[in-house]
Amino acid sequence: MERDIKTLLAQMTLEEKASLCCGDGFWNTTALPQHGIPAMILTDGPHGLRKQLGTADHLGLNESIKTTCFPTAAGTAASWNRELINKIGVALGEECQAEDVQIILGPGANIKRSPLCGRNFEYFSEDPYLSGQMAASHIKGVQSQGIGTSLKHFAVNNQETRRFNIDAVIDERTLREIYLASFEGAVVEAQPWTVMCAYNKINGEFCSQNKTLLTDILKNEWGFEGFVVSDWFAVSERDKGLAAGLDLEMPTSAGIGKQTILDAVKNGTVSESLLDEAAERILRIVFRSMDGKKQNAVYDKTAHHRLAKDAAAESMVLLKNKDKILPLSKSGSIAVIGGFAKQPRYQGAGSSHINPTRIDIPYEEIEKAAGEAVIRYSAGYALDNETVDGAMINAAKETAARADVCIVFAGLPERMDSEGKDRKHLRLPENQLIVIEEIAKVQQNTVVVLSNGSAVEMPWEGAVKGILEAYLGGQAMGSAVAGILFGDINPSGKLAETFPVKLSDTPCYINFPGEKTKVEYREGIFTGYRYYDKAGVEPLFPFGYGLSYTDFAYSDLRLDKKEMPDSGELSVSVTVKNTGTVTGKEIVQLYVRDVESGVLRPPKELKGFEKVELKPGEEKAVAFTLTKRAFAYYHTGLADWYVESGDFEIMIGTSSQDIVLTETVHVTSTVKEKKNYTIDSTLADIKDEPAAAPLLAMMSGNLKGGEELGLDLDALFSSIKIQSLIAISGGKMTMDTLRQMLNEMNG
Ligand code: BGC
């Protein structure tokens, strides 16, 4: 419906406009019935709908209505399946329509800086491209149903420790290339209706009142059309927030926020036009949600449960399958060990906590899927504490020893995958660790099924034959696990994060979670695999890794050109073939490497991926298109993305560490990098400048001799400062001649 929002705004009082910019209640925006403006409900999200009818809270403490619990983002990202995530989004949108919710909070696009972050289960990846793509697919799915999303938590909210006031100190290039890029991809591609600002500060300024972040970058540079909402209770000074681009404060601040805005507009510290702009952004979304409202909407709970199962199955990553221990035979005897088999871990703790419509219990699903096989169960460990119980362990060992094969369900209890708290270590609970180790001693055919929202250390990895990372698989996790264990489903997930051997191997180990109120991102752009690659640290399982019950072969990598300007497009294609005996899905990954660079760059970066399904013997060509951003780094001097002219390798990998095919393209920059030589520059800096040629020739002539002393004249020569030439030349060169030369070179 066409509405004249400007005319409507002109009819509204200052007070009405200010109240529109402040929540009314825990989950509602303010209604202005006199202007035909209803309240909207914004509620969590992201992997299911959390609508509270009774007492409201932002920590997942009180009851919410029953809705479908899908796998959390850590899992869905491991599917690398845009279409699947889009379908989950559609289902979430349908549930919102049925439950009269207008905006479902999420997805979370924060980067996994450390596996210790308590909320990693809610985030997609350590890689900004993958994370942005997954977030965009989620947003498009939800919004296709006339329901809004809230991309969160913008930005650099990568830890739970002191999440309300931590100051993330970060350099601009890292901010742009890693932490903002994940949001940028989602905003530019999917236009979420809202973006939720984070609690923390960036370089000294709260996100909720950070103009560079909310206005200059998000709205002006990326063209974000929706409104910015605060994370719950993130507002510090409402007037400064409004001036910075924070449109809506949530939840209600009992009139305080509104009064602060009114005072600021009246005393001129914030202009009324800024308030109008915020109100206009909010109104546009209110009207969009009114137009998108479907009357008498219902959804199919069974179909959504089925989708939750498909999603869970694709989210799981087969990490180890020695001697093809999996899939299991449907005969013989199977020991099932671990409390999680009967009380599954399938979601994280905190504001995303869902009250599921039903739950598939892994143990029951295994019984159903096992055919003739005899199943015996033993708990092995307690779920609510870490005490090692000798009697429980002995009983579990006995059950395991009597069977042909043993499945141990292990993972992190909910208290360790939790909003508001980071983990202190990457170990499994002590009692689970001991159970796995003890069982592996008596049963050589042991498979561990893990339920956790983020990487764990596996000192027992060498002692077991199979490892299935099931992540937090949502309400249908149990049936998906059973399907994979018995081969009814072929696993197809690959890690969207690196699993380190030990915590001290992780990129920000020394600087996480910071000291006092500050955390410094000293590892810079080297997050995740960018660090492991660069530092040569061997991970336990690399980014992009995951096994299948079939095999794939790659051939025929083709680039449509050998050279191009950075304004051009590169078409890449590669053929993938299923060389095994069962149908499977492969995730084809494309990485780009700048062969030689004048600035620090990661050895490779993910710039494309596709998931393809192939029957045995079938092959398909997979196509990618690469544009400037795939080759660029963020140039802080230019304040823009910049491609340094040179060769770039296009690498196709089955993981970040298994590159199977490589081709090279030469890309030429169309942007002139501004030169800024000064008298403090060195001879090495100007060595390629034509204007410097006579000077350099003269200098190298003067510096003849010395080789016999073993001196590296080139190195000595290169490090000389231009200003020093005045003294070195005995005054023959003057400051004036040098400046003239510098001016010429700087253009
Ligand atoms: C969380 C958000 C959540 C909000 C509302 C906050 O504490 O950080 O992710 O959407 O509460 O529950």
Image: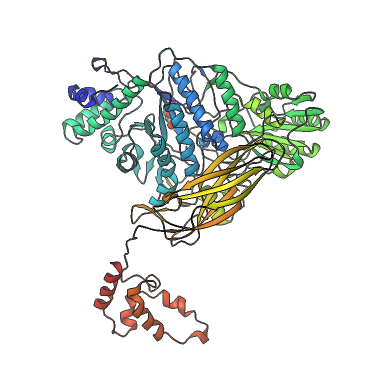
Toward which corner of the image does residue 249 lie, by quadrant? top left
Q: Which residue is painted at 52% across and 87% down in the image?
A: 708
- Observer-nearest of 541 and 668: 668
Q: Is residue 245 left or right of residue 108?
A: left
Q: Which residue is painted at 26% across and 15% down in the image?
A: 33
Q: Which residue is painted at 48% across and 14% down in the image?
A: 298
- Does 267 appear above or below 511? above
- Does 683 appear above or below 28? below
In the rendered image, the quadrant that contains the N terminus is: top left
Q: Is residue 528 visible?
A: yes
Toward which corner of the image does residue 264 lie, by quadrant? top left
- Observer-nearest of 7 and 61: 7
Which colour scheme appears in the figure? rainbow
- Observer-nearest of 314 and 513: 314
Q: Which residue is painted at 54% across and 36% down in the image?
A: 77
Q: Position of residue 359 (x, y in %)?
A: 61, 20
Q: Position of residue 567 (x, y in %)?
A: 39, 52
Q: Is residue 590 left or right of residue 490?
A: left
- Observer-nearest of 468 and 26: 468
In the rendered image, the quadrant that contains the C terminus is: bottom left
Q: How many marks?
A: 0
Q: Position of residue 233 (x, y in %)?
A: 37, 29
Quadrant of ligand 1: it is top left
Toward which corner of the image does residue 182 lie, by quadrant? top left
Q: Is residue 60 visible?
A: no
- Does 478 appear above or below 113? above
Q: Position of residue 497 (x, y in %)?
A: 56, 43
Instruction: Please identify the residue farthest to the left as the structure is shown.
Output: 267
